[in-house]
Image: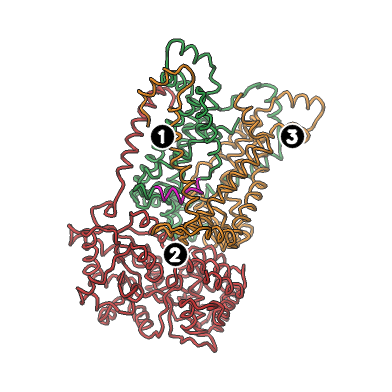
Amino acid sequence: MSAHSPTSHAPAARRLRRGNPLGALGGLLWLLVVLVPVYWVLVTSLRSREGFFDANPLAVPSSPTLENYRLVLDHDFGRYLLNSALVTAGATLLVLAVSFLAAYAIVRGTGRLLRWTFSLFLLGLAIPLQATIIPVYYLIAKAQMYDTLAAVILPSAAFAIPLTVLILVNFLRDVPDELFESMRADGAGHWRMLWSLALPLSRPALITVTLYDALNVWNGFLFPLILTQSPDQRVLPLFVWSFQGEFTINVPAVLAAVVLSTLPVLALYAVGRRQLISGLTAGFGK
Amino acid sequence: MAGVPLRSTLAAGAVALALTVTACGSSGRTVSGGSGDGVLVWALTQGSETTFRASAKEWNKAHPDRKIDIQFFQNDPYKQKLRTAVGAGNGPVLFENWGGGGLKSYVDAGKAADLTPELEKNPRWKNRIFPSVLRSTTFDGKIYGVPANGVQPVVLYYNKQLFKKAGARPPKSWEDLLALVKTFKAEGIAPLAMGGGSKWPDLMWLEYLVDRIGGPRAFADIAAGKKGAWSAPAIRKAAGMIRQLVEAGGFAKGFTSVSADTGQAEAQLYTGKAAMLLQGSWGYGTIRTGASKFVAEGHLGWTGFPAVKGGKGDVKNVVGNPANFYSVSAQASGKEKKTAVSYLKDGVYNDSYVDNLLKGGDVPPVKNLDAELKSADNPDWLSYVYGLTRDADSFQLSWDQALDPELGDALLTHLDQLFLGKISPKQFCAQMDRAAAK
Amino acid sequence: MSAPGASGAAGSRSSGGAPFVMAAPALALFSLFALVPMAIVGYLSFTRWNGLGSPSWTGSDNWREALTSDVTRHALWLTAKFMVVSWLVQTPVSLLLGVFVAGRQRYRTLLAVVYFVPMLISAAALAIIFKNLLDPNFGLGATLGLPLLDHNWLGDPQLAFYTTVFVVAWQFVPFHTLLYQAGTRQIPASLYEAAAIDGAGRLAQFRHITLPQLRYTIVTSSTLMLVGSLTYFDVVFVLTGGGPGLATRFLPLDMYITGFQSNEMGRASAISVVLVAVGLLLSLIIVRFSGFSRMRSQQAGM
């Protein structure tokens, strides 16, 4: 589950270090496919609105301006950032708390109910969230929660449960039984074992799922689109989308909004790339 | 994350979570929400946005105890937003709409308030508005909305610079238009810009062609739900002419993916990439905002939709929207309703409101405007729109608004297919007949 | 949330396993927002509801309409096509890239770092990037004047479909590349050494060692790809809105447009049910015929 440590190093490395010109060519080609749009976004976001129309689209702007970024920041960007942070933190913490409890119970418990619950979660992996948007909207409207951040947090968390539980279950199963047994011999109950044993041991898995769930919620679009409407409750992806409508053909400004909305995740990537990657391939990467 | 003990992090997290969820939950807002304490108003971006903003500011200054809080939405997502919000019991107190079938579904669901008693109580307010305009919001003799901006006939805009360079003249007939297509294509300029990605601009072509060929009668049959009305010769022929124009390369490359919401089609016109644009009168405001110099220097031209030889429709007939309307939510509290009505009565169409509309090229459908029209800074455009509306025997409301929303949506889908050449004119008629029969 | 004190006592008293109550909050949350909605959507599919009033029972009308509608059938067919084409595009690219960046050369690691960037961008932002980049008038191709790039990417129905496939690939290839990279790095080096002694060339090694050894990764990645493209919504919604015409109106788009734009929530619910059914069916088939579950349990034991 953790980042892949280079095991059985020497011989593998020798093979893997051989040159491969064809591969390198392909690799470079894809690099271009990835970088050209990203580069275009960056240079365009630095152009003035007028400069956009007559400049060579890939040239470095002759007089770069941060005006577009200021425009975006002036449009309540801070509030949307805060909303996104609240939604992400709320949903992630919620899903972590309930999933960890459930995973512990599933691994350390025996009852038929628990086995049944686990199967249900496994089945739940196949339920597409898109297909439930109409009834979720119906429920949220009936519960008078329409247009609140909680309306986004709760369903987002609910749909993250199956995978989170699955990953945590897989991880907890690897914890040797003896550790629990010896604690139990000391008279510890399940809540204490959960808190003082399972929790500290699960740290890597928890970090992994945290990042995975957080990124998914952060970038989520459909729930906020349907379940909120006012600017007060707007999250970043929705902001970027509505900003492009408001700013007609001011492409540089729209792209500046795109850059700003991605910046927090990019920063996270710069700091914790390894955890983020293992988080994203969580449960699949083995 | 390293270094911080996991368990204390979690404990802190749990507390934060509890706080977040309760905080978010308790922020559940009622109709009166919004950033301020005012009455929430929903309106559309572009078009008359400037006027709406100015009016809200002025009103709030004069009525600190009866504020309004106005929020703006893009045209295309607006309909969905409004419906989900109103359906969830969380809609605005005042909402902009187009009247017709769309508004009727709100009326049927009991979501729009009957404004008739208020209007009857204030004859000065009611009598100032052109009665024909109120027809779009009148159901069973009750009025559910009042106009909030100007009349919106659809006209053909053109770039005078490009026309001059090509030695061309604005089209008077369909043949002229086809000839212009050739002329501009030879110059490497797109003859017609269009925001086909939004689908409803397609409709303006069909509406005008059907009118020019068959007169207002053809659509009257459709609206009456007459069987086979979509297969009438006028519709069939109009659909064929649309194909003809598309195949001749009349529309700018990629027009089917250009969104009308973002003002791109207008931009093509004023940046000299396209020569003409069929658009509602709100296009004038969009162009003025995007390229005020272009308009000020007189490079923007406009004319009516060309005639079709042998057609029954009068070339003076227009299609478009009589106006956009404000309706009041039936769910609003008594106090909110009162504020909303007083704003509609005294805020909307007061002197500065009308001035702002005129400045943006909007002609409000109210009586006794001659003096204002003359003294505005763009009298050519205003008197053109005013005259166009006045002289038209038939002012056909946009079909997607006039029909019920489901059929309107089916129409846009099928028409889009027709523009793309995915279906033939014959198939278009047959499919629409089938959709209408449902 | 549950009351830890009370149930904790119960837990320690029971001699055996952990108490069910610990799993209850997750089960409750999941049921409320995933299972209950499934029941509601089933109910709504038999009603007429325009989103404003209250749903009214209509029997099987929606089902008849949805199943006979040309548009919905087309959406179903389009979704199948999209799944297959996406798989055909993404699998070779990510497999080759994954194997390539599994090498330990520094530049390959660096490449992997950059490849990953698209995954960080939200679907909405990504779609907006490409919408502007591919704009027929003001986009990169149009302004650069390169004939190769200057096409009607999003306005031509045929092209728009493949453009969508590409944009989705742009977003998801990084993820699958990662899977393949990780998978490749787990292949025991001894296998390659033996092959090298037998004189097998690079291509032979790739065919006879790398590919077979990656079979579980291929199954995992393909499952995620197929099930994922069934429900793909965000990027397509912002990029094309399902158009031009019906060119990218996949099943989830069809559901959204039917429900939230044409205001036929009942019929849209019927489409939702189809979506769920196809998703479950697909997962079951894959699990059954690919040994995915065996692999899972194997992994769980690792």
Determine the chain carrying the residue at label 1: A
Provide residue B239's location: percent of width, then percent of height. 57, 76
Rendered image: mark on residue B57: none
* Residue ID at (56%, 57%): C249
Q: Quadrant of the N terminus of chain B?
A: top left
Nearest the eye: A264 or C71: C71
Q: Report if the CB atoms under discs 1 and 2 are less than 8 Å apart.
A: no
Provide residue C49's location: percent of width, then percent of height. 44, 58
Please give left or right for residue B38 compared with residue C282 in the image: left
In the figure, the red chain has which letter?
B
Nearest the eye: A35 or B356: B356
Chain C shown in which color?
orange
Q: Which residue is mark 3?
A: C206
Nearest the eye: C57 or B28: C57
Asked which secondary structure carries label 1, the reply is helix
Q: Which residue is mark 1?
A: A94
Residue C218 forms part of the magenta stretch? no
Q: Which residues are magenta?
A: A129-139
Nearest the eye: B192 or A227: A227
Determine the chain carrying the residue at label 2: B
Asked which secondary structure carries label 3, the reply is helix
Q: Amino acid at mark 1?
A: Leu
In the figure, the green chain has which letter?
A
* Residue ID at (58%, 67%): B417
Q: Amino acid at mark 2?
A: Gly
Between the C-alphas of marks 3 and 2, the distance is 53 Å
Between the C-alphas of marks 1 and 2, the distance is 42 Å
Label 2 neighbour load within 10 Å: few <14, some 14-19, many 20+: many
Q: Main secondary structure of the magenta part?
A: helix
Q: Which residue is mark 2?
A: B263
